[in-house]
Amino acid sequence: MDPAEDTKFALLKRIFRIAEEQRGALEADRLQRFEALLDERQGLMEALLSAAPGTRPENVIEFPRRGQGEDDAIAIEALIKGIVEIDQQNGESLRAAMSEVARALGTLAEGRRVAQRYWSVPERRPRLERRG
């Protein structure tokens, strides 16, 4: 690989590791860690995009194959596929977590509504008596 390709490959490897760390943070319910990794990853993505200049959509990174060895191209492709796969899994985990939160909020709201109705009946309200 030429030096520019080495830089891209190193950035992709770090992004892959961060994607794995993000998965671990989600599995451990450490959303603040997940968010910190998002910030770190964003910086790496910006560096990767600046290392791969050219005319392309903003979300596409150019990796020319001309002059690359087949092993290099396979390694880069495997890293990109791995990142995409982990990102899809992380997205599914986040959607599942948000669904759980929505269910829990619904249960809390229902509990609050029932408690308000229960305590609205005068004979069920706690009575405070003055002593002395």
Image: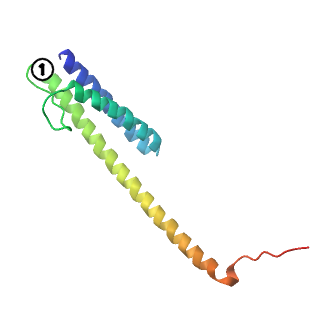
Look at the picture and state if 38 lies above or below 116: above
Quarter of the image that includes the C terminus: bottom right
- Left-right relation of 52 to 114: left
Locate residue 65, reporting x and y percent. 10, 25
Judging depth in this view, the residue of 97 and 113 nearest the camera is 113
Kind of residue sitting beneath label 1: Gly
Q: Residue at x 38, y 39 (%)?
A: 22
Q: Residue at x 31, y 46 (%)?
A: 89
- Left-right relation of 39 to 74: right
Look at the image and name its color scheme: rainbow
Q: Quadrant of residue 70?
A: top left
What residue did someone put label 1 on? 69
Q: Residue at x 32, y 50 (%)?
A: 92
Q: Most extreme residue toward the top, as rendered?
A: 3
- Left-right relation of 33 to 51: right
Q: Quadrant of residue 15?
A: top left
Q: Most extreme residue toward the front, as rendered?
A: 55
